[in-house]
Amino acid sequence: MNLKNSILTAVATATLGLFLIGSGTYAYFSDTEETNNTFAAGLLDLEINKEKIINVEKMVPGDSVNGEFQLLNEGNVDIKNIKLISSYVVNDYGAPNNGDDLGKYIQVQFNHYGKAVFNEPKTLAELQQTPEEIVGEFPVGSSPKNFSVEIEFINNENNQNHFQKDTIELNWKFEAVQRDGKTIE
């Protein structure tokens, strides 16, 4: 082999060797950091200070009765509003009511700090049809919301004998709705 070919072969071999060494072993700086994140759902917890607000016996048309209660935000989530969901069952004692509903003659008005919650008092029959908002925003850590409620047996000036000894089993549920979602920083 001539000298020129020997030099070219040596240069090619050296280049190939450097390429193999360089591509197999190279160095760079690196750093790694790690985080551990927790996501916890909030607690929406509406409390009421008593099991029975009003327990009445022997009402006659024209009678009214008052009761008081408090709602408390015991959770860690702000409440957007609280709705009253009302339902009842009439237990007919004697004469059939012939389709007449005692709930149409029991009128209710809620007061929140002395101000009427409804523009006009509502009957139990009306309240049963649609949930009603009784209070707006209720942030965590707020003072209890004080309510009074007045219930009146409406005297329609007609014969209401068919309601004698009837009873109403009234159920009120107070439903809290969470605040609107937001971007938390």
Image (cartoon, helix red, strand yellow):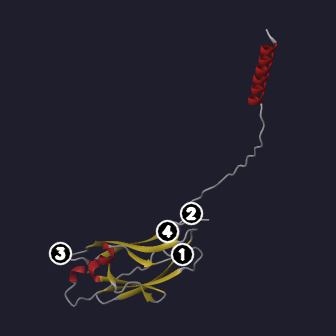
Task: Using the numbered discs, state the Cα–Cα distance from disc 2 to disc 1 in whole angstroms.
Answer: 16 Å
- Residue 72, which numbered label? 1
Q: Which mark is residue 98?
A: 3
Label 2 residue SS: loop
Q: Earlier in the sequence, mark 4 or mark 3?
A: 3
- How many badges with numbers are in the image? 4
| In-front residue for pair 1/118 | 1
Looking at marks 2 and 4 on the same chain, the residue that comes earlier in the sequence is marked by 2
Query: How would you rate the neighbour count of disc 3 (Cα within 10 Å): few for under 14, some for 14-19, many for 20 or more?
Result: few
Would you identify the image quadrant in which residue 103 lies?
Answer: bottom left
Q: Give the CA distance from mark 3 to mark 2.
A: 50 Å
Residue 165 visible at all: no
Tag 1 secondary structure: strand
User: Residue at 42% of width from left, 86% of height from top?
Assistant: 66
Residue located 47% across and 83% down the image: 147
Q: List the residue tagged with mark 2.
A: 42
Q: Which marked residue is nearer to the observer: mark 1 or mark 4?
A: 4
**Whole-Å distance between the Cαs marked 1 and 4?**
19 Å
Q: Nearer the viewer, residue 136 or 61?
A: 136
